[in-house]
Amino acid sequence: MEFLRAAQNADGGWGYKSGGMSFVEPTAAVILALAQDAPNTVLVQRARAYLKNMQRADGGWGIAAVDDESGWMTAWAVWALASSDAEAAQRGAEWLLQRSGIRVTDPKQIEGIEKVLKIDAGITGWAWQPGDAAWIFPSALALLALDAVQIRNHPRVQEGIRYLLDRAIATGGWNIGNPFMIASNLSPTVENTALALRALAAHGIENDVTRRAAEWLAQENFTPTAFEWAWRAWYLTQMKRNDERARAALNAWQRADGSWDGNPFTTAIAVMGTHEA
Amino acid sequence: MKTISRRNLLRLALGGGIAAGSAVIYKQTESVGFDKWARWMLRGQRARFASASRVALAAVAGAPSAPYDADILGALRELWRDANAPDLQNASVVLKPNLVDYVPDRPCYTMPQVVEALIQFLRDEVRVKRIVVAEGTTFRRDAHAILMDTGYRDMLERQRVDFVDLNYDDLVKIPLRGGYAKMDSLFMARTVAEADAFISVPKMKTHHWTRISASVKNLFGIVPGIKYGFPKNTLHMQGIDAFLAELADSLPTPQRFAVVDAIVGLQGDGPLFGAPVATGALVGGGDFLAVDATCARLMGLDPAAIPTLTFMAWAGLGQIDANKIELRGAPLASLRRSYEPAPWI
């Protein structure tokens, strides 16, 4: 808390390091972390005002004040503002619903892509930026944001769910996009797996894909860093599971200044991960 | 009946030919615009008459079981001298290795021993003012995991050098000079934009999109993932060749140099899953294109068959013709290997 208080910029936002320029993602994540226990502190109110100021005329958010194009961080802002500013969150949600990753429609192309990447390219999720293909992180994030504003039956939500299920690695978990490349299964990553699992759970999906992914996450088959532990602990806490091992590992990574990696974003995820389930 | 003289007939034919040729060129260049095409083409023609680019090759003779236990610092010293490297005394320098990802037993990243030797050389012998090692990893959002897995974290602690994650750095917007991609400007990490010198320290590899990956492809790591995504696919959508040309043309640092880790290269399914090839070389130079063309030759590949290189050379961004590259140091023939090309997607 002291670290986050000290790292807040004059504009109300947080960057990815103390004194770094404010970005929408770390600011939204810190709001979500702090608002768990104290939703109306001055710190949080200033951060919400930063996000509100950053909203663009089209309803979306860029990554920072210097960015003049709405993109994937819209989902973070919608999620963070859903409980306090329904109008702004709703406009952001509309922006999300009107966007998608590139959708391949040519059956021959779909067949060719299926051979190389083992995916159904006719199903898409959300992109990092308009005009790009869909990827796991922005897609899972968009599903969580839409859940936060209680949009669950929209066709884009249903397609987003199918996208995540289609892109799961056969042995469990999610890489950043495709599960497979030419001749090899790609490796799962913790943040993509944690976020995708949480997004699917938020929309009531539980099946073999999610069970295999949860098993992979439980194996701790990842490089132990503050970031990776934070995302694992975040997922377990979100799923109302107290995991003392994840919490202890995360505590061991906390620095003397109270941060994880000196990074407000990682710290916010870790704070959520160490919160009582 | 009025007759037309032979001279006038020839004039008419010549004028008609020029007009028809211009119309064809105009039509063919419509997608990028004739003015841009003409600017690139004229610069490319000028480059044909420019002096040759200097590239140095240094042999690094390590034991087969431990190729990176060799005298890399000594090889770098020779490379720096032979390549006629820029004077970087008192400069702030960004070293940009290729840390695309860590895949066990796959030599897909620049080995830390090369970067460590470069840090020692620049600090102790060139006497630069400041060094940072910087990378914006392609696939994973957490560079710490890659730094740990690849041995960089220990090396950086040992050398007391900071790492800057270019995916999360403060941003500056830089104008794109070339017009090759459909963008006027680009967000770039402040650390790179404000440095005096940028040294690309890639791994020599085959690559399934760009055929080879060396100093030019390594530039993809300087753009921020938080804007362009992981793996920065938005920029791939611009056309990889066009966007790499843009990066090479618009890199704002006043000085640039490349040192390529070709001690053990990667062949086949690059950039991640290829197999190692012991090559025992470092490649260095200030003209990234000439360096990469030399890498291609070192891998037994023809630079003229690599679209990124041919496009950039045509546009005058460097040299790839062997006759316009002045090779110094170890003979290329003694280091050349036959790399299996990447399966092209």
Image (tube, coloured by chain):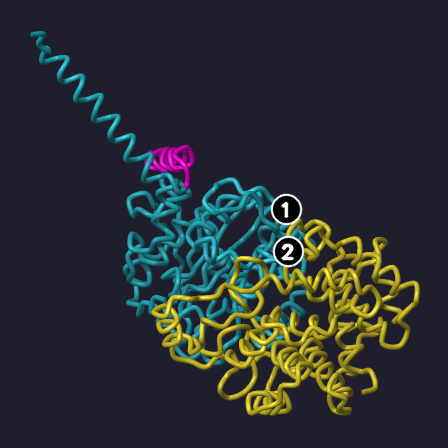
Chain colours: A yellow, B cyan
Mainly helix, strand or loop, the magenta region? Answer: helix
Q: Does the magenta stretch include residue B42?
A: yes
Q: Pick the quarter of the image with the C terminus of chain A.
A: bottom right
Among the 4 quarters of the image, the one containing residue B141: bottom right
Q: In the rendered structure, the residue with mark 2 lies on which chain?
A: B
The foreground one among A176 and A207 is A207
Q: Residue at x 82, y 82 (%)?
A: A275
Q: Which residue is drawn at 36% across and 66% down?
A: B345
The foreground one among B286 and A71 is A71
| Mark nearer the N terminus (2 vs 1) | 2
Label 2 vs label 1, nearer the camera: 1
What residue is pinned by disc 1?
B173
Q: Which amino acid type is marked by label 1?
A: Lys
Among the 4 quarters of the image, the one containing residue A85: bottom right
User: Magenta part of the protein: which range?
Assistant: B32-49
Q: In the rendered structure, the residue with mark 1 lies on which chain?
A: B
The foreground one among B136 and A176 is A176
Q: How many labels were placed on the picture? A: 2
Q: x, y percentage for residue B125?
A: 58, 53
Among the 4 quarters of the image, the one containing residue B160: bottom right
What residue is pinned by disc 2?
B131
In the rendered image, the vertical position of residue A153 relative to residue A19, given as above or below: below
Image marks 2 and 1: residues in contact by CB distance under 8 Å: no
Q: Which residue is drawn at 84% across and 57% down?
A: A49
